[in-house]
Image: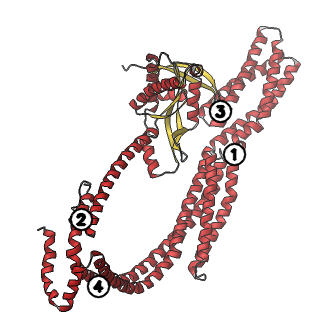
Amino acid sequence: MRQDQLPLDKAKHRLEWVGEIQPFKYLLHLRQRMKIGPKLRIGFGILILLMFVGYGWGIVAGNRATEEINRTTNLRAPLALVSGQAQANWLKMEADVQAYLALGDQSYRINYEIVRKQFEGNIRELETILTQSQDLESPEFKGLSQTLAEIRQHYDAWNELAPQLFELRDDQLQREPALRILIVDAAPYINTIIVDTTTIINTQKQQTPTAENLKLLSAMYDFRSSFYAMMAGLRGYVTTGRPGFKFEYQANEDVNTQAWNTIQSTQDLLTPSQIDGLGKIESARKPFLSLPPLMFEAVEGPNARMDLRLFRTEAVPLSDRILGLLDRQAGFQQELLQSELNTGREQLATAQIITIVSAVIVILAGLLVAFAIANDIARPILRLTEVAQTIKSGDLTARATVTSQDEIGILADTFNSMTSNLQYTLDSLRMEQEKSENLLLNILPREIAELLKNKPDSIAQQYGEASILFADVVNFTPMSSQMTPIELVQLLNKVFSQFDNLVEKYDLEKIKTIGDCYMVASGVPRPRQDHAQVITQLALDMQEIVKESNYFGRKLTFRIGINSGPVIAGVIGRKKFIYDLWGDAVNTASRMESNGMGGLVQITNETYNLLNDEFICESRGVINVKGKGELPVWFVHGKKKST
């Protein structure tokens, strides 16, 4: 006999005398003749009746607590929740404005408008909740109304300020005083100096080539070339703020002044028209030279960016006041919420005591019913429960023993069938889940896949340092026109599979392939210090393996371009999504490939500076890149041997 059966048998033995009493004897006889269904209906009917009586008593006692909780639920909790949502939305609005002023990305401005409407909805919801309060004359209501009025007032001021910030950010001349001085104020003087200097030089060329005239002509050329260099340095410093451009301007200003003094000292060699032009230059040069210090002061001072100054001096204090009011509102409501919840808990405690007493009565009645039906139901169900517990622990091979044809036997048989079906379903589900996981990891990096499973919205991450590689087949279009579609796919599959193995070897991230173009990133989504070195080594290995391989009787040549810089990486959309990169660094890497040479690896100056003299690099010079202008580029021929 099992140990768990002993208490039931002992209880049965102690209650046998009850069966000798005539009324109970009749009931026991009736129980033995009844089916399981009627037994359960009668037994549980008694229990339900007792439960209704007991819980009805508890409900009456709990109504008072419920009324207090309802007040909390309908007023305090919504006010605290909406206040918190308003705080979160306001912080998002402020962050979007900051991001737009810093980056100029229209997506931040669009998102700002979306969040702004949500914030306005929060304010309206707070006002609606307050108007539904039943105590409109209370000090609490008046205080909350005053706080909302202040928030609304500050928000109206913010709505007038935000368009000004956006307008300044979109108008470069308005937001950058130094650039406005250069383009608006200095431009007439610059044009006068350049035009009259060129006229004087052309006149001087026609003079007799004596030593004095040639020396004067050389001074004129020095004046003009140094002035051009001054303008280049000035323009570079105004637009970038880099000290090197300011030094370039100042150095060439000294050369320009020396050349000007030389020309001034030899006016006796000039023609009247040249002397007249010289006067025009002097009348333009003097006011022009007074402008660069103003530009330097604008660039180096706190007002270099008027939009950021306006944000710092007006928007931030205004935002702090709104956040302070919202925080005060949320904190006050949380305190009231806690106080009223404590009162509700005390009233609920009283109701719980009543419920416990009722529950004890129901339990005692339940025990009586349990003793009555134990022999017919409990023990077979216990055996079935043991099997269920075994299955719950993970053993789906366990099966219940069918010992009868009654309802318990039918239940055991059905349970066995259900267990078999469950085991088959779980095995199938496990296989399908493994397939899905493997498929997802073939599309996305593991880190991004985990993020996407936990947060199925758009994912975007900023990486300050990364390197991007583009590789493309040279003369792919004419070659593909000579191949069947199947041959073309087989060729690309072979070469890209080789590239995939190299990417996996160096623990980099393949982004995508488009036609014959292959894109790889280093430093995303896993940041690494050697992102430039490892992707450069990958490019060299790719060229080497292509050079050594034969692709169905064809030899291929690849152009490879690399650039380094900040990128934005993420997954957007809801269907057929991919992990992709955006940013100027990505566009420049693509230009490095398209402007490269077959069989070589071309890198930008940014990547070259990160290689730390570890690779054999050859300067190609400066090339004209679409959308970027002239850029210095390098060819990488291999890695230097360590000494």
Mark 4 touches mark 1? (CB < 8 Å):
no
Asked if residue 434 is positioned above or below residue 54 in the image, the reply reads above
> x, y (%) of residue 8?
16, 75
User: Which one is earlier in the sequence, the residue at label 4 or at label 1?
Assistant: 1
Q: Which is closer to the viewer, label 3 or label 4?
A: 4
Q: Secondary structure at mark 4?
A: helix
> x, y (%) of residue 175?
69, 45
Distance (Cα) linking label 2 and label 3: 85 Å
The residue type indicated by label 4 comes to Ile
Mark 4 touches mark 2? (CB < 8 Å):
no
The quadrant where residue 370 appears? bottom left
> x, y (%) of residue 159?
68, 59
Q: Which residue does the numbered mark 4 point to in the structure image?
A: 361
Label 1: how many Cα within 10 Å (few below 14, some 14–19, many 20+): some
Q: Which residue does the numbered mark 2 point to in the structure image?
A: 384
Q: Which is closer to the viewer, label 3 or label 1?
A: 1
User: Which residue shows up at 41% across the image and 29% down it?
Assistant: 501
User: Which residue shows up at 15% across the image and 75% down it?
Assistant: 7
Query: Where is the C terminus found, in terms of image quarters?
Result: top left
Say which of 135 and 480 sits in front. Answer: 480
The residue type indicated by label 3 comes to Gly
Q: Which residue does the numbered mark 1 point to in the structure image?
A: 170
Label 2: how many Cα within 10 Å (few below 14, some 14–19, many 20+): many
Q: Which residue does the numbered mark 3 point to in the structure image?
A: 236
> x, y (%) of residue 297?
66, 41
Asked if residue 447 is positioned above or below residue 136 in the image, the reply reads above
Q: Secondary structure at mark 1?
A: helix
Task: Evaluate whether residue 294 shows in this view.
Answer: no
